Structure formats: structure tokens, C-alpha cells
Image (tube, rainbow, N blue to C red):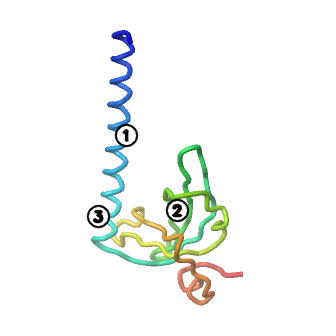
């Protein structure tokens, strides 16, 4: 292995460690903000994006009569969740901090309407 290859390998490893650190820091900040002023409501999943190493759920919810869009990494491809309603925890101080619970589907139409959605 040449000196250049060693340097490039080291730089690559340091870059990966840095990105993992940033990801964990952001997740910790998200959880901290939610736990400080937790509010639970209902969100609707409108898109699932999948890559080779990730699956990302996009959803929206209503808080104080405003519509908020958010997203969250999920464990696997959850295409069956699209256009369904789920519980979401958010920070009442800053609703951009949210965490959806795809294992807690909401099917009660009255509850869905109370959360701000127009139910068909």
C-alpha cells in the first residue's frame, strides 16, 4: 500500500466517523427537543424514499392550525404506509422536531379529523 493510499484511506475513515457523529448528534437533538415539550398528534405518510442503505418516510401533520412537513428514517421499505395515518411525537416549542411511529397506525376517522385532516 502506497503512502497516498494510506492517506486517502485515513481521510475516508475520518470522514465516515465525522458523518456518523453528525447523524447521532442530530438524532440526540431531535429526541431532546421532543422530550422537553412533547405533543402527540397524527401524521399522514405521503412518500417513501429508498436508497441502497436507507429508507426515508415523508409525512405531514397539523399543529396550531398550521401544516408541517417532516421526514424520518425508517428501518425498511414501508410502501404500505403511504396514505395512512400514524402517531407522531413532536416538540410543541418547535414542531420541526418530530418522530413518527409507523407501528401505531390510526384508523379512527373522528380522531383523524380532530387532528386537522379531511377524511374521505
Q: Residue furthest front?
A: 1
112 on left or right of 23: right
22 on left or right of 81: left
N-term-proximal mark, 1 vs 3:
1
Q: Are marks 1 and 3 in contact (CB under 8 Å)?
A: no
Marks 2 and 3, Cα distance to the nearest angstrom?
20 Å
64 on left or right of 110: left
- The location of residue 107, given as percent across then percent down, is 62, 83
Residue at position x 53%, y 73% in the image: 103
Q: Are marks 2 and 3 in contact (CB under 8 Å)?
A: no
Residue at position x 56%, y 59% in the image: 57
Disc 1 crowd, CA 10 A, few/some/many (<14, 14-19, 20+): few
Res 19 label: 1
Residue on which disc 2 sits = 69
Disc 3 crowd, CA 10 A, few/some/many (<14, 14-19, 20+): some
Q: Is residue 56 above or below residue 112?
A: above
Quadrant, the N terminus: top left
Out of 47 and 13, give the one closest to the viewer: 13
Out of 18 and 90, give the one closest to the viewer: 18
SS label for mark 2: strand
- The location of residue 88, given as percent across then percent down, is 47, 72
Q: Is residue 116 above or below residue 13?
A: below
Residue on which disc 3 sits = 32
Out of 78 and 100, give the one closest to the viewer: 78
Marks 1 and 2, Cα distance to the nearest angstrom?
24 Å
N-term-proximal mark, 2 vs 3:
3
SS label for mark 3: helix
- The location of residue 93, given as percent across then percent down, is 33, 69
Amino acid at each position: 500500500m502506497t503512502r497516498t493510499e494510506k492517506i486517502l484511506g485515513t481521510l475516508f475513515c475520518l470522514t465516515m466517523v465525522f458523518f456518523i457523529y453528525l447523524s447521532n448528534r442530530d438524532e440526540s437533538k431531535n429526541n431532546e427537543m421532543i422530550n422537553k415539550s412533547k405533543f402527540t398528534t397524527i401524521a399522514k405518510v405521503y412518500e417513501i424514499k429508498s436508497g441502497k442503505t436507507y429508507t426515508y418516510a415523508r409525512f405531514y401533520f397539523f399543529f396550531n392550525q398550521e401544516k408541517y412537513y417532516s421526514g424520518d428514517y425508517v428501518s425498511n421499505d414501508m410502501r404500505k404506509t403511504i396514505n395512512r395515518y400514524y402517531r407522531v411525537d413532536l416538540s410543541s416549542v418547535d414542531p420541526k422536531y418530530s418522530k413518527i411511529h409507523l407501528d401505531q397506525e390510526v384508523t379512527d376517522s373522528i380522531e383523524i379529523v380532530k387532528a386537522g385532516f379531511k377524511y374521505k
